[in-house]
Image: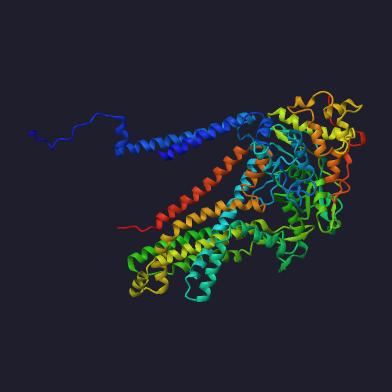
Amino acid sequence: MSQSIDYSSPPPQSSFSIGKLWTDKKSRGVLIQLLAMIAFCSVVLYLAGNVVENFEKLGKPFGFEFLQQESNYDINQHLIEYNSQSSHARAAVVGILNTLLVAVCGIILATILGFILGVLRLSPNWLVNRLAYCYIEFVRNVPVLVHILLIHGILVHSLPKPKQAINVADSFFLTNRGFYMPQPVTEPLFWAVIAAFAIGVVYAFWYRRTAKTKQALTGEQSPIFWVMLGSIIGLPILVFFLSGMPLSWEQPELKGFNFKGGMALKPEFLSLWLALSLYTAAFIAENVRSGIEAVSHGQTEAALALGLPRKRTMNLVVIPQALRVIIPPLTSQYLNITKNSSLAIAIGYMDIVATIGGITLNQSGREMECMIIVLGLYLSFSLTISFFMNWYNRRISLVER
Amino acid sequence: MNKFTTIATAALASMALSNGASAGTLADVQAKGFLQCGISTGVAGFAFTDDAGDWQGFDPDVCKAVAAAIFGDTSKVKYTTTTGKTRFTTLASGEVDMLARNTTWTFSRDTDLKLDFVGVNYYDGQGFMVPTALGVTSAKELDGASVCIQTGTTTELNLADFFRINGIEYEAVPIETNDEAQTNYKAGRCDVYTTDASGLAATRSTFENPAEHALLPEIISKEPLGPLVRHGDSEWADLVRWTLNAMITAEEFGVTSENVDQMATGTDNPEINRLLGSEGDLGAMIGLDKAWAWRAIKMVGNYGEVFDRNIGASTPIGLERGVNNLWTKGGILYSPPFR
């Protein structure tokens, strides 16, 4: 009873018991994570084992040697040299390039359209505002596959056949087999134009740096935009004319069944590109709107009060802050475009899924291998985009001092 | 903890499931009570849905004959539609028990793809269809043409070979199904539609003005079409193979769905007797009873009846028997003997 308790010393260590693992908060946390990890690993192991077992049962070998064999099929749109004697691997590369082409074109167009729509959506003009609103609500609430099929249907069914092509200035032809236009053919002297362009770019960035340094030192501003425009675009154009226009155009011509020569945008590419861009632009527009609205009006007022002109207020105050809100959701829209491009299969655009994941898979019977390749490719595209956008996001994010 | 138990139970359950389904295909089919049959998405005469929504045609009839042999009931078939691209995966994964969908028997499919073709029910070849307005009379005049082609088929490979050998160019317009190909062909997205000649004739018969479209004279390949099963279950392959052979043999010996009852009571021809079960017990050798072939013939008909009913000269498809006639009548259809 009269025993005094020494509060300063740590409480006596109780001996270890199994029950304690569960009652103690810390060890319980570790235990649960451990069990979850074991469960996860065993599911993965089971699935892998299942695959191996089924492969053995079917007597199918696993390997990627088939990629070296002739593909034996033709692909109508190939950015690199390809014919039916090329290997499956090359067919896969053709597919990859086609996917990248439509993804990159889609990202560019969707971004431009999205920004325009987003700004229109904020317009004080009631009609413009409502029209943008209706467009966005219509487009983003209809599945993208429907858009793709719709545009493809319109292009193929409503445009004329090659012999009745819509002819614009004997150079551009619009048919249901594609949009044909002249192709530039470079002549020997064209290297001068390319050199001029390279010099222009170098000079432009050098000028911008010195101009910025000058502004930091003296506060004097230089016409950066116009000088950059002039050196990057103006200089090559000047050299182009001075060197006697070393560029000729190969005109598309109707020969037999189809147009030959020139460049062609096939209806499959056009419909996929337009559908993906129009669809994703509606989402981007909402991102842009939310980004701009997230910048409090006080910021604009403060900038105006400091005497900044409206344009500079927009460029220096509103947009940099809006971008911080816009970029993260924009990343997922870019990822969506890339992944949605696999819907190409519905209209016969030869992307990765149609080449390596479709015809090659079917002709060689290597389902597992082909699907692994397709999966790996999409994953690496998406991770690359994600990586780049995250880098950009960090660059523009608020740096606190 | 709950989550973990759920996952563990699910994993164990799926393990148990996957281990259970390894008996023979025939036993599996009998256990589940129906035959799962892979067919095409639709080719007039070969596979189409009737007014009641049931699948009919030359290919589903093979499935029905097998179902009749096993169950004595042609309605005990469930159909899975497959495209040229999905068919082999569907079969290999066990989603269907057999495929009967104008599929060409080739070396690599029979070996490397681990499938087993059990016979040929239609000897075909790849042809070309063009609008007569184009004025084309030979496939060799097709330089620069756009060609609609179903992806994942042998025709796709033959096409590439044909144009390469003849040194002419073309634009391949890849299409998933026969219906899509028709739509694109009619819209003028392609000048030419190529597939098996029988499929072209069938497709043309559905057009508003069949006379405006011509089949070119070139047949550029051999396309032996037939039913197939997964590799590795020979008993099941035997059953499907001999059901098909029974239909061909029945035609050869004049056994039809009309007279099969009478013939089953016994005839002077021992082969007919063995086929219909009044002599010997062939059915037991493939795991069925004596009357298996009798049921198939009674309920579906012999090969000739099936041909005439679905795609023959009296139908809108109007295909001639040609090489698909019996060997005794100038064709190459030939069943091994029932002995």
B61 relative to B114, above or below: below
Q: State the residue in front, B187 or A219.
A: B187
Image position, residue B32 (x, y; %):
65, 36
B110 relative to A329, above or below: above
**Is residue B26 shown left or right of residue B273?**
left
Image position, residue B232 (x, y; %):
68, 29
Residue B338 shows in this picture: yes
Residue A196 shows in this picture: no
Image position, residue A77 (x, y; %):
67, 52
Q: State the residue in front, A53 or A15.
A: A15
**Is residue A77 shown left or right of residue A123?**
right
**Is residue B178 shown left or right of residue A150?**
right
Image position, residue A256 (x, y; %):
80, 57
Q: Quadrant of the C terminus of chain A?
A: bottom left
**Is residue B11 shown left or right of residue A164?**
left
Q: State the residue in front, A317 or A62.
A: A62
Q: Quadrant of the N terminus of chain A?
A: top left
Q: Residue at x 61, y 52 (%)?
A: A343
Q: Quadrant of residue A376?
A: top right
Q: State the residue in front, A317 or A295.
A: A295
Q: Residue at x 61, y 56 (%)?
A: A145
